[in-house]
Image (cartoon, rainbow, N blue to C red):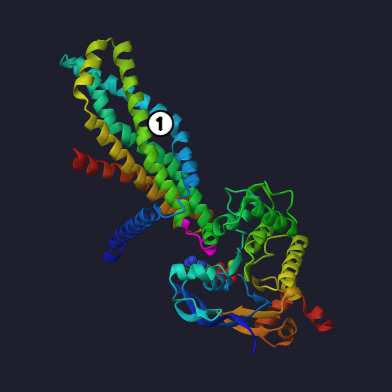
């Protein structure tokens, strides 16, 4: 293997990072330029937000439930079952709420974004927009990024609440942990800052996955096969980026 | 002197090692139908995309109404693009919108017209291409020929002086192809626009063309009226005509 082959994936990664960065600045500029295309944003908010409710609902609830079960197993050994409530609450709000919501929505809505925009690229619909002297980034990407940025924190709040309810149900109703101590410790140790950190992360994940998925679709080529490939790559790249940026954001916002 | 709308000078374009356009020279006359004939893969779509600024050439010039467009930035290009309507190869209708919304889209986004006026124009255009009554269908629910006709209506809806067509009759049955050709001819006669059609359908296009240019090997190897082209002694043209069995028809003329 020569140097060229080793450097090829690296240069590809750098150029893709460049394309996502370029689109980010384009979006930032175009987002405030009239006309604002509110109707396009609302339609995407419905798609990203409302249509993701069932999957966020299930993910949040079961994550909270299994968190309670697992921490019960550990805390019982040291007689600290009373800390289950705060453990579930902190894990959900700071970490699992935003990350799992990000991953689920990236797989569901992000894949659809890559596929839709990719199809528009290979069937010349994007060229048709350009030829009408309309900016495709403004019409196709900006509404999706704004919608994801706005909806992910809201979905995360829902996941947080359902996770805590699920944890409450498992701990208090199934495992007979005292209701008073479960809630009391949670109120005492869960701070507003914990919730805030989680929501900021969620908003960032929204921007990250929507940009990556739109970018993959926007530069797709090679017919239906190319769109399929772009979609798969978009979901994988989004999920990996969410996990990597999660660490960076958490250490910054600690 | 002829009135030239588009002048292409020594246009060259390669993709990696694949030289597609190798010095194209062509002049498109105002108010005429100019047809660019070539085999598939000969670079017709690439040429069309250069004219409308969707691709940048490696070298060469493209003049539209006296302005050289290959070095314009995006906002200047957009000004130039308002002179054009384009019918893409697969019609390129927006698949999230109905036929009616597709045709109305340029009016809604590019003009400040009132709703009633938009409705009047769109209904008129749909009527013109024979799609009245199909206007609330999605592109995925109609046939290829209907998509092309809707694409034609969308390309004409802003009344552009120049219309570009990428393979308007490819992939549809011969009867529909003939309908589309008639539509193209009728609208051109009525509106006195400049039409540039790229196609490999030599028989169909010879019926409606004022001027024909033959693209082969990345160059325009022949240019003239259909009669002139048929009488030329150029290898590629003979092949094309032979394949299309038009020789006898040509001889009778
Ligand atoms: N964006 C592109 N990138 C690389 N190669 C391209 C691109 N567009 C067209 N080509 C190549 O240019 C050649 C001509 O394509 P095209 O203009 O679509 O032919 P046609 O005459 O059938 O319309 C083909 O070999 C095609 O592979
Ligand atoms: Mg083509």
Identify the image quadrant of the N terminus of chain A: bottom left
Residue A105, position in %: x, y? 40, 38
Residue B186, position in %: x, y? 76, 68
Q: Residue A166 falls in which quadrant of the image?
A: top left
Residue A181, position in %: x, y? 22, 13
The residue stretch that appears in magenta: A130-136
Query: Is residue A4 something that shows in the picture?
Result: yes
In the figure, is residue B128 to the left or right of A218? right
Q: Is residue B112 above or below residue B70?
A: above
Callout 1 secondary element: helix
Q: Is residue B140 above or below residue B232?
A: above
Which residue bears the numbered disc 1? A56
Q: Is mark 1 within 8 Å of ligand 1?
A: no
Tag count: 1
Q: Residues within 10 Å of mark 1 (few under 14, many from 20)?
A: many
Residue B61, position in %: x, y? 49, 81
Residue reaching furthest bottom?
B1
Query: Is residue B18 something that shows in the picture?
Result: no
Q: Quadrant of ligand 2?
A: bottom right
Question: Does the magenta portion include A5?
Answer: no
Q: Residue B28 falls in which quadrant of the image?
A: bottom right
């Amino acid at each position: 293997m020569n140097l060229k082959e080793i450097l090829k994936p690296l240069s590809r990664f750098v150029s893709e990072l460049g394309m996502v960065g370029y689109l980010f600045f384009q979006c930032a500029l175009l987002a405030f330029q009239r006309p604002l295309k509110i109707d396009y944003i609302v339609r995407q908010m419905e798609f990203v937000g409302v249509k993701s409710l069932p999957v966020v609902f299930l993910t949040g609830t079961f994550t909270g439930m299994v968190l309670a079960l697992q921490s019960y197993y550990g805390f019982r050994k040291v007689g600290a079952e009373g800390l289950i409530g705060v453990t579930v609450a902190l894990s959900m709000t700071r970490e699992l709420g935003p990350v799992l919501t990000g991953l689920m929505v990236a797989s569901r809505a992000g894949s659809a974004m890559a596929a839709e925009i990719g199809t528009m690229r290979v069937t010349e619909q994007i060229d048709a927009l350009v030829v009408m002297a309309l900016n495709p980034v403004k019409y196709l990407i900006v509404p999706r990024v704004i919608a994801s940025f706005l909806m992910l924190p809201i979905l995360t709040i829902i996941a947080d609440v359902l996770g805590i309810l699920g944890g409450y149900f498992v701990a208090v109703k199934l495992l007979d942990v005292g209701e008073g101590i479960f809630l009391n410790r949670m109120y005492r140790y869960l701070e507003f800052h914990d919730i805030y950190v989680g929501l900021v992360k969620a908003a960032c994940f929204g921007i990250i996955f929507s940009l990556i998925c739109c970018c993959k679709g926007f530069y797709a080529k090679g017919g239906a096969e190319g769109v399929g490939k772009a979609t798969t790559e978009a979901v994988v790249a989004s999920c990996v980026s969410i996990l990597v940026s999660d660490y960076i954001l958490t250490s910054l916002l600690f | 002197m002829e009135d030239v709308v588009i002048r292409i000078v020594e246009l060259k374009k390669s993709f990696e090692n694949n030289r597609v356009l190798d010095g194209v020279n062509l002049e498109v006359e105002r108010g005429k139908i100019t047809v660019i004939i070539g085999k598939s893969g000969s670079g017709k779509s690439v040429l069309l995309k250069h004219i409308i600024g969707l691709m940048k050439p490696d070298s060469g010039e493209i003049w539209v109404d006296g302005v050289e467009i290959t070095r314009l930035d995006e906002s200047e290009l957009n000004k130039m693009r308002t002179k054009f309507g384009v019918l893409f190869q697969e019609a390129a209708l927006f698949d999230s919108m109905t036929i009616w919304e597709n045709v109305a889209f340029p009016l809604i986004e590019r003009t400040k017209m009132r709703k009633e006026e938009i409705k009047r124009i769109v209904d008129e255009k749909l009527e013109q291409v024979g799609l009245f009554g199909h206007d609330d269908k999605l592109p995925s629910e109609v046939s290829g020929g209907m998509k092309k006709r809707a694409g034609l209506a969308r390309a004409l809806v802003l009344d552009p002086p120049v219309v570009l067509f990428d393979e308007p009759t490819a992939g549809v049955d011969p009867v529909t192809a003939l309908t589309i050709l008639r539509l193209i001819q009728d609208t051109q006669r009525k509106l006195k626009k400049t039409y540039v059609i790229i196609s490999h359908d030599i028989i169909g296009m010879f019926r409606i063309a004022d001027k024909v240019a033959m693209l082969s090997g990345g160059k325009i190897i022949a240019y003239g009226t259909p009669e002139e082209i048929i009488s030329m002694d150029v290898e590629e043209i003979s092949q094309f005509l032979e394949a299309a069995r038009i020789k006898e028809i040509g001889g009778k003329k």
